[in-house]
Amino acid sequence: MRLADFDYPLPAENIAQEPLPERDASRLLLAPRAGGDFSETVFRGLPRLLRPGDLLVVNDTRVRPLRVEAKKPSGGKAEVTFIRRLAGDEWECLVRARGPAPGTRLELPDGFAAEIVAESGAGVRTGPDQGAPLWRVRVSGGELTAMLARRGRPPLPPYIRREPGADPGPDVDRYQTVYAGEGEAAAAPTAGFHFSERLLAEVRAAGVGLARVRLDVSFGTFAPVRVERIEDHVMHPEAYNLPAETAAAAADARAAGGRVIAVGTTVARTLEHCADASGALAPGAGETALFIYPGYRFKVVDAMITNFHLPRSTLVMLVAAFVGRERLLAAYAEALARGFRFLSYGDAMLIS
């Protein structure tokens, strides 16, 4: 299949820049997998759409504070997102500054400093048709991870803009799920943003089970697909953990006629990576580089809750594999016509 097969027009005004005041007040597009009309409800109405015996599976990874404000020697403002350690004191980073180039030095909080060494060869999508390179950055001043724990902010997606000096408090709270546990994620499992503690309690009261997996989402989720033939794309590996109790809960739900509902593409990838041909799950931990695109046959996921994703992204391809490419593009066109909010802080879709 061609990369262009997964393109669609995404106006800038449909890209959500801020979360709604209430998590479960987001809109939910209902997209029957078998076809038919689309409809919508408010996300907090989800329990009425589920059945006793269904199993919701969530990704409980925790997003690390990887973004810090910086200054150039000229006094100009900058921002650095530390994505991963390369070797020694070098990191791969997204640098937001005017004219970043090899040799540029940046002042970081608490006496730390960073020097841009070279482009790393990777990049990220900063919008539907924009991108930015990632940089190799050499850091001095001490142990960076300790400084990030003190002064770091959430590593917001490149298409969400914040003014330097803006209050990070709202993003600290909202760029994290309410059920986040441990983890080393560099990006959030955003389908879970819509769940409040109140809604989770209502889901349980409706006789729906709740199980957890962990997939440490990497910043590679924002990497552009650079090949025209999508079958040639190599997926970025991510660490996962599938607990034994989650594997057992999925087996019990399916045996009783319930559905396994993945909350997000990260959950879908984890479950499908760990499933055999019959849909039985093997618990354990490791890395997955599973790339799901149309033609893939799902073995364990029966329904999916997902946000609306960037065009030409691996996330769009995964959802297209689940619901069908033409059906997905029709759902996205419907959502845009209805004024739905897209991407990480946007609304959601239930495919069932």
Image (cartoon, grey):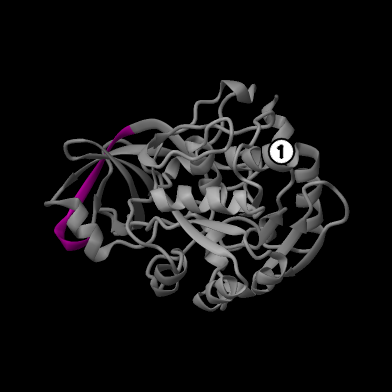
Look at the image and tell me in which quarter the N terminus lies: top right
Please name the amino acid that badge 1 sits on.
Answer: Asp
Q: Inspect this view and state whether residue 109 appears.
A: yes
Dot 1: within a 10 Å radius of its alpha carbon, few (fewer than 14), some, or many (20 or more) residues?
Answer: some
Quadrant in the rendering for residue 136:
top left
Q: Position of residue 26 (x, y in %)?
A: 65, 70
In the image: residue 335, left or right of residue 154: right
As displayed, is residue 308 above or below residue 327?
Answer: below
**Vertical side of 86 occupied by 29: above or below:** below
Instruction: Provide the secondary structure element on which disc 1 rests.
Output: loop
297 relative to 125, above or below: above
The verdict on residue 115 being magenta is yes
Residue 322 vs residue 102, the one in the foreground: 322
Residue furthest to the front in view is 256
In the displayed image of the protein, which residue is found farthest to the right? 36
Q: Using the image as rendered, state which of residue 81 and residue 278 is in the foreground.
A: 278
